[in-house]
Image: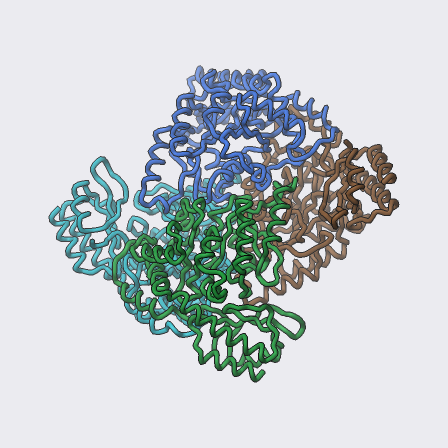
Chain colours: A green, B cyan, C brown, D blue
Amino acid sequence: MIQFQCDYNEGAHPLIMENLLKTNMEQTEGYGLDPYCEQAREAIRNACKAPDADVHFLVGGTQANATVINSILRPYQGVVCADNGHINVHETGAIEHGGHKCLAHPSKDGKINAEQLDNFLAEHFTSPEAEHMVQPGMVYISFPTECGTLYTHDELAAISKVCKGYDIPLFVDGARLGYGIIASKGDVTLESLTLLADVFYIGGTKVGALFGEAIVITNAKLKKDFRYNIKQNGGMLAKGRLLGIQFLTLFTDNLYFRIAEHAICEAMRIKSAFLEAGIEMFVDSPSNQQFPILTQSQIATLAKDFLFESWGKVDADREVIRFCTSWATKPENTDTLIEAIKRL
Amino acid sequence: MIQFQCDYNEGAHPLIMENLLKTNMEQTEGYGLDPYCEQAREAIRNACKAPDADVHFLVGGTQANATVINSILRPYQGVVCADNGHINVHETGAIEHGGHKCLAHPSKDGKINAEQLDNFLAEHFTSPEAEHMVQPGMVYISFPTECGTLYTHDELAAISKVCKGYDIPLFVDGARLGYGIIASKGDVTLESLTLLADVFYIGGTKVGALFGEAIVITNAKLKKDFRYNIKQNGGMLAKGRLLGIQFLTLFTDNLYFRIAEHAICEAMRIKSAFLEAGIEMFVDSPSNQQFPILTQSQIATLAKDFLFESWGKVDADREVIRFCTSWATKPENTDTLIEAIKRL
Amino acid sequence: MIQFQCDYNEGAHPLIMENLLKTNMEQTEGYGLDPYCEQAREAIRNACKAPDADVHFLVGGTQANATVINSILRPYQGVVCADNGHINVHETGAIEHGGHKCLAHPSKDGKINAEQLDNFLAEHFTSPEAEHMVQPGMVYISFPTECGTLYTHDELAAISKVCKGYDIPLFVDGARLGYGIIASKGDVTLESLTLLADVFYIGGTKVGALFGEAIVITNAKLKKDFRYNIKQNGGMLAKGRLLGIQFLTLFTDNLYFRIAEHAICEAMRIKSAFLEAGIEMFVDSPSNQQFPILTQSQIATLAKDFLFESWGKVDADREVIRFCTSWATKPENTDTLIEAIKRL
Amino acid sequence: MIQFQCDYNEGAHPLIMENLLKTNMEQTEGYGLDPYCEQAREAIRNACKAPDADVHFLVGGTQANATVINSILRPYQGVVCADNGHINVHETGAIEHGGHKCLAHPSKDGKINAEQLDNFLAEHFTSPEAEHMVQPGMVYISFPTECGTLYTHDELAAISKVCKGYDIPLFVDGARLGYGIIASKGDVTLESLTLLADVFYIGGTKVGALFGEAIVITNAKLKKDFRYNIKQNGGMLAKGRLLGIQFLTLFTDNLYFRIAEHAICEAMRIKSAFLEAGIEMFVDSPSNQQFPILTQSQIATLAKDFLFESWGKVDADREVIRFCTSWATKPENTDTLIEAIKRL
């Protein structure tokens, strides 16, 4: 079976494995205080052009989301998000476990917009009953979204402006950030994202690493005592240097974005194949996740040779299906899939 | 500098690195549902002689402790532990973050005893004011303890009996389990521990793995929905097979205990050196952590060439110091340390 | 200004005040262990025809909801409710504060239905990704709802049946239970509700008491250690007898329902007045809350003499307005309001 | 049976009942926004000579403690307290339920001292491992303590100074504040306490009210959004004016302190009787709780006519017993007790 069901089927980029092996028997301090972590932090600060940013390494996305959100919100505050945002649907209530409500907003394509946000915040803060409701305390968006779509730079800037107007931090979940930046073709860059968000993370797990997410905090008010939060949320890796070595590798010679480009290229080939086969896409995704709407018969045919994920029913016969590529997708596997699509 | 400050200075055992490398580009399902995890679970069940046990892999100790404890307790219940237990002092309140009080009991050597426990439980459950107090809902002990000491089989059996009498689960933190089992010289075995505890974990991070703790649940009442808890607590590793491969390696050909034996051997050499130098030990530890009581001048001398950790002041001049060995400790480094001790 | 903005503008029914005064200097035990609480419990068990029910008295509704929900759910479980349910919108995240997600379902009239519920539960428990999502652990409905509407007996029975099928408790928020029972005209009785719900509460605050909600637990599995939960959630009133005396008074000679009837009678007069004036109602409420849709000019006119609450905009000019009656509503105030409505 | 087991056996001071009755059928806004609450706030601000203080009314002590502590601490912070402090032993883990550890310090008489506190804070904030431990985020003391003892003004000032040095708020639990202030005989006044604490509460439940605690916040940084916290913690009483009326009555014509004086007077009579009978006291309490150490035979004798509480065993035969007086203690009951003590 060829696997397209997610972007974390394989291990790590060979260069990462090489560096892990090379340094395996070195002795270093634990908990991210080693020289590799320090160099990786510096490399990321350089890539973001944010010399004052704080950079922290965590193992996974749910952990990163919970740690950041718990560190920002007061107990009576919630996090504004799209109703299909990862924190709202696929983290088994990790955010509520920390005491906070996801203030979910309807979204078809995974995005929320500045106007919707502005209206909601205005309504809350002018309501005579505000104190009976959860106070919006931050905004969470994903780039790219869970549907593979992207915010444009202008959309991000508009959301960022609304947030600043209410003094509410903007947090960007970048579990697939590399794919998003490449897919945006220069519209959104790591540098511009750094300027617009108060805190975001650079996903490693899905973009070349064995595991790891690099949290970048630019808003000075959010930096204090962050490591206490990491430890409390179970995210302080003993052998922290494993994260340092991986991110140092990814942010050396632009590896992170170079391998992301491969995934986008493969995804575009798949997308084209579906479109040429006359198959409708659920959303117009420019990134590494593609969502064709397939009939049960088409699904059954493809399921003989490929693993993929169902994204929900459209009607009695049709279903949204997700195909993911990654840095590790073999072009010959994509070829095989494209052939299969043509035969549908 | 030669590092003895903890048992997670190096990476992983070379065989683990080899297996990670060998399987790196294979495609597997995520979240611990891959064949390697399944084989590792089976290997652990075999080693424990517990064919019905549930085995789950988590990344780190704080995460494992919080997940297990959150999964067992009702909101108004707390976890009984030694006052110097890891959950009570060194996890930044991860247990309280989940809503639970650590019901800490005085302990000099890291152990609690059955009588102390029985009295406490009897007192609570017969108190007319019980409902105004946190109800003891489980017991947490470490094997070995944070001070390197060990419960004997009989001590464990007595604690286990008290727990069963009150229908309260016994949870054993085995972050250094391999070292403890070896150090106990046959008194406590993986098999006997499995029979006495309701749930425990087999520490990988400190015993040969890059990271990872294998939770073993034998009490059927504690098994239900455990994976929901893992996910909610941020502990479900996307590329779960990394854990499977590591534990499969450790539990093949008894590697886990073979490498633990090396650490104990090196620790005993260090212990003898201190004792021969007439230096008092804080506790009589048979395991991989040794706690000499040193003067400021002795500390200053050793600090020139070695990293170690302070464990607290004894008086104006003297301090308890921790030296850790591990599977990775180089005998020549131990030799150098022993020479230095002799010169003190 | 005449106040119709809520059903807790006045103090308590005169008989309650009389009994509080009469017993004021008596000495009793605290925390609900006094004879008045015991008698009140017995009176409620009799009224419910549930001799084995556990009855607990709490001060307010948010506290009662949080305590019941925290006592039932495991950490990874959430509570299914209508999106306009009180716990989801007007309790400042008290449920999330306890670690639980409100699994909110779209509802126009405050009700959810058995089919919607069944589909949702079936979908969760058959999903291959279930463990990545919050598990539905109980169902919360309000009787009457926040919109004044009522479930019929058959609707309740259908929901109850779905819950039992999934072994998920059904919790009924009865903050206005007296008004609901009376408004249902024999369709839903205290007795039938007791049989259909696993736990519910009888609202006192809005139906004649100074404060107080009587939680009735019929499902034996939910009874254990409930008083620990009350205490932990800050709901154990020191002078608990104040609650006992109030509920004993309300459940003597059927006072609770007799005074509820008055509120319904006054509400129906107001409803008729609006309908006769050709004013549309947002929902067809048979209970003590009425929701006319008024123009800004109508609102301005009524606001000169009456206090009422806005329930949200319908369009640029029109707004849903809430008028509440209660056991304490003076008929002459209703008369004055009806005259004003006629003049609109 | 004559009851001395606690200070909340009776209802409220007759003047409070009178005022509740007089205003019973008035219509007011809910949630503490009514004119009585406003007047009561003003009266308390005047009594404290703190025109800028925020004053909030809650129903009970556990609720007040949890709400204040949850409003102040960040998730990774804990509250420093005496090990016998109410929050640490008698609130069923309400503080941990909010996610926070009680950082308990050994205390025989219920007090902690400035030196102990200073050492602890210094140790934490200079520890290289600080981020692995719960950060002390505030200090909680009780005035009077749970043992009836009092801090002197100088002791309070010293603690307050340490807190300010670390920018850590000082919170004073004043469940029995009236009794403490009177017992201190001018050493600690409401005014001086207001200057030394960042936030405290004035207990009503035990000093004349049916229920109610008035939280006084003087530190401007702690004021923001406090009402959201009240609501989230289930403490926003619908008919809030009940609290306003009670505290307005208590703070009119100095009623609060006048009735507290009666309790102290009765307590001193009891204390003298024990001392004259040659009975040792567990602590030298100047306030309304007295703790004689009695033999089992003495206990059995007194238990025939009086209710009192056990405070724990001293040895095989002897036990610490608590006798409480209150504003409502009848002098003739005290006389009867004194006679009984004489006969011991």
Report the number of discs: 0
* Residue A194, x across and y down, in percent: 45, 54
Q: Nearer the viewer, residue D296 or C152?
A: C152
Residue C327: give x, y in percent of width and height.
77, 36
Residue B264 appears at what percent x and percent y? Answer: 24, 58
Q: Is residue C159 above or below residue D173?
A: below
> x%, y% of residue A202?
43, 59
**Residue B233 vertical placement versus C338 (above, below):** below
Q: Residue furthest bottom?
A: A343
Image quadrant occupied by the N terminus of chain D: top right
Q: Which residue occupies 58% across, 40% down?
A: D228
Q: Residue at x 35, y 39 (%)?
A: D125
Residue at x 61%, y 77% (from the top left corner): A279
Between D286 and C296, the one lying in front of the other is C296
Residue positioned most to the left? B343
Visible residue check, residue A274: yes
Tell which of B211 and D217 is nearer to you: D217
Residue A164 in the image: above or below residue D13: below
Residue at image point 47% right, 61% down? A175
Q: Is residue B177 left or right of residue C324?
A: left
Observer-nearest residue: B25 or B154? B25
Judge whether residue D340 can be spotted in this image: no
